[in-house]
Amino acid sequence: MPATTHRSTRRITPHTARYAEPLRYSIAPCPLGYLLLAASAKGICAVLMGDTPHAVQVELQQRFAEAVLQVDDAGLSEDVQQVVRQLNDPLRPAQLPLDIRGSAFQQQVWQALLHIPCGQTRTYSELAAPLGSHPRAVASACARNPLGVLVPCHRVIARNGALSGYRWGLQRKAALLKGEADAQAQ
């Protein structure tokens, strides 16, 4: 199948077209619905989950509105397989180069998330304290994380131990945490 190239629904002018970044992406079914993996020249810049291929494609277009998006199922096949393997076996994390984009504060939060071991959780307050921040600011940064699963914002819970807030739905968050707990128990 030939590659499909498209731009977001924003009006592209000659000026913006000159600076439009190319991003390759692939969508595949996974245990949590559909997974979209997008890559820049630097590495994986998005891992999104949704109920339909259209839903994840729309989210990608919204997050990277100025990018030129190109379907690349063949070129990203191994990367997608690594992420799906991680979903099935959380103790075998994907080893992919990441292109982590966000504000300085978001990047601090996301780096802290990368240090939460598989099968463990932290509260928003526990993440906020060493950053000198507020739990709501940490929650906001988690909600803007474009690298679901690879930057494990699903490992952050409310102070009372309840699941709270997850960009891709509480059912997916619960499933990810259960999968990690089950893998640790084996």
Image (cartoon, rainbow, N blue to C red):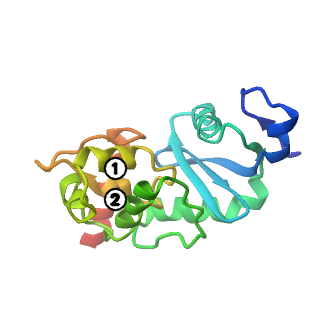
Identify the residue at horizontal 34%, vertical 59% (top origin): 179
Identify the residue at horizontal 51%, vertical 53% (top origin): 102
Q: Residue type at mark 2: give it.
A: Gly
177 sits to left or right of 145: left
Q: Could you say where residue 81 lies in the image, as x and y percent from the top left?
A: 61, 62
Q: Residue type at mark 1: give it.
A: Ala
Of residues 83 and 24, which is closer to you in this image? 24
- The correct choice, above or below, for 56 with respect to 76 in the image is above
Of residues 125 and 50, which is closer to you in this image? 125
Q: Are marks 2 and 1 in contact (CB under 8 Å)?
A: yes
Label 1 sits on residue: 175
Q: Quadrant of residue 65?
A: top right
11 sits to left or right of 154: right
> Where residue 134 is drawn, which disc sits there?
none
Q: Could you say where residue 114 lies in the image, as x and y percent from the top left?
A: 39, 67
Query: Is residue 5 visible from the viewing direction of this image?
Result: no
Label 2 sits on residue: 179
Mark 1 crowd level (few <14, some 14–19, many ≥20, 10 Å Cα): some
Q: Regarding mark 1 in the picture, which secondary structure is present there?
A: helix
Of residues 81 and 21, which is closer to you in this image? 21
Identify the residue at horizontal 55%, vertical 73% (top origin): 95
Q: Quadrant of the N terminus?
A: top right
C-alpha span from label 2 to label 1: 6 Å
Mark 2 crowd level (few <14, some 14–19, many ≥20, 10 Å Cα): some
The residue most toward the left is 160
Q: Quadrant of residue 17?
A: top right
Q: Could you say where residue 145 lies in the image, as x and y percent from the top left?
A: 46, 50
183 sits to left or right of 102: left
Q: Could you say where residue 125 lies in the image, as x and y percent from the top left?
A: 18, 54
Q: Regarding mark 2 in the picture, which secondary structure is present there?
A: helix
Query: Is residue 22 visible from the viewing direction of this image?
Result: yes
